[in-house]
Image: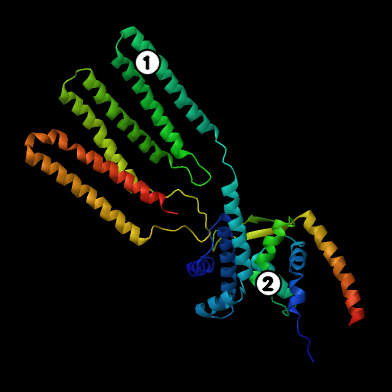
Amino acid sequence: MKIKIENYLDSLFDDIHETKQVRELKEEMAANLLDKINDFIANGDNKEKAFKKGVASLGNVDELINNLRTASQAKVERNLLKPKPLNKKHVMGYMTATVVLLLGFVVAGIVYLLSNNVIYGVATFVSFAVVSSALYVYYGLTQETAFNYGMKAPRALAYSVASAATLAGIFMPLLLYLNGNRLVAVFTVLLLLIIPSIIAFIYLGLTEKSREKITAVSGYQQLNPQSVKVKDTLSGAIWIFATAIFLIGIFVRWQYWKYSWIVFLFAAGFQVVLEAFFQSRRR
Amino acid sequence: MNGKISSDLLRGHTDTIVLGILQYGDSYGYEIYKKIIEKSDGLYELKEATLYSSYRRLEQEGNINSYWGDETQGGRRKYYTITSSGEQVYHQNKLDWEFTKKIIDRLL
């Protein structure tokens, strides 16, 4: 009976954005309605009749619902207009990231002057920049703005680590190469850093949920089926082309595999961009 | 000829009726509803939806406060308690009603 009542009340309020207020009203009404129905049953009604009588005696809930709708709409709008000041944690986070970056300049300068080797200097700076960018990404994603909620910490951490690995994966092999290291070593470092982070990005991109604050009380618009189809087709095309280019490379000259696999990196990049593009159209 | 109840007239006094019941102690939705039926000797049954609107209004105006009971069976009840400003409002409304009633009695 309790579940039946709850379902009934849910259906009554189903076109209102469920705020704490609405949830509590439903809970209150459910308890009272249950008491009343139990009284009807105690007076000899069967369950079905008692439920019907109880629901009928609620009367016209239109006024109640309209008031709640106005209130919840007003609340959502107020929240949108309210500027979101940075909290202490984020201020500290951004400051730390900036300090690390500036420190990177200074230390890199010193390293360069002591060693007289540009590559050492740049390598030092890149190390600092990687840490700093990881911090920026993490705090940027977890920050709540007027239109979006902050990302959950574990997810933001994954993005942060993946982008740090990507950054390191681009610059470290480049520096190793310029330093005259063997190409095998250069590629090993590149693959070890880039591939896991691309896998991470693809996973994160595909499982991304909208953090948009609901602006319309009736809920937010989902992607329409048409654009989901377009997205899937484009995504399929990207990977087929990438595979085709890779295979053509090998067929032309089999040693080309060393280079042609790079198209998969681009394909993965396009996939993420595609995902982001369709995500941003969700409004 | 039997008189019929004027729902419109009564509805205008819902808030005061609720305050009047809460004067005797804290209560929750269904109990308040039953007390209203009981006090009117079963002649008047307020619709619950009207009462919920009334609780919301009274709470926003600061005339009542609410808290959750600690029932374990059947779901938590929301209890209402009258505030001192609620008591003042009740007495003022009652005085106003007495005065209005006197005039209407003379006019009708």
Disc ID at residue A13: none
Q: Seen in the image, is A39 located left or right of residue A176?
A: right
Subunit ID for the residue under disc 1: A
Q: x%, y% of residue A37? A: 57, 73
Residue that carries the numbered disc 2 in the rendered image? B34
The answer to whether A60 is drawn above or below residue A265 in the figure is below
Subunit ID for the residue under disc 2: B
Q: Residue at x 13, y 33 (%)?
A: A258
Q: x%, y% of residue A269? A: 28, 41
Kindly give the residue lying farthest to the front in the view shown. Answer: A252
The amino acid sitting under disc 2 is Lys
Q: Quadrant of the C terminus of chain A?
A: bottom left
Numbered circles on residues, count: 2
Q: Viewer-proximal residue, A5 or A15?
A: A15
Q: Residue at x 32, y 30 (%)?
A: A167
Quarter of the image holding residue B69?
A: bottom right
The amino acid sitting under disc 1 is Ala
Pointers 2 and 1 within a single chain: no
Q: Are marks 2 and 1 in contact (CB under 8 Å)?
A: no
Q: x%, y% of residue A250? A: 9, 39
Q: Viewer-proximal residue, B92 or B83?
A: B92
Q: Viewer-proximal residue, A43 or A162?
A: A162
Kindly give the residue lying farthest to the top in the view shown. Answer: A114
Q: Residue at x 36, y 46 (%)?
A: A276
Disc ID at residue A108: 1
Label 2 SS:
helix
Quarter of the image holding residue A171?
A: top left
Query: Alpha-carbon neighbours of circle 2 within 10 Å: few (<14), some, or many (≥20)?
Result: some
Q: Residue at x 82, y 58 (%)?
A: B88
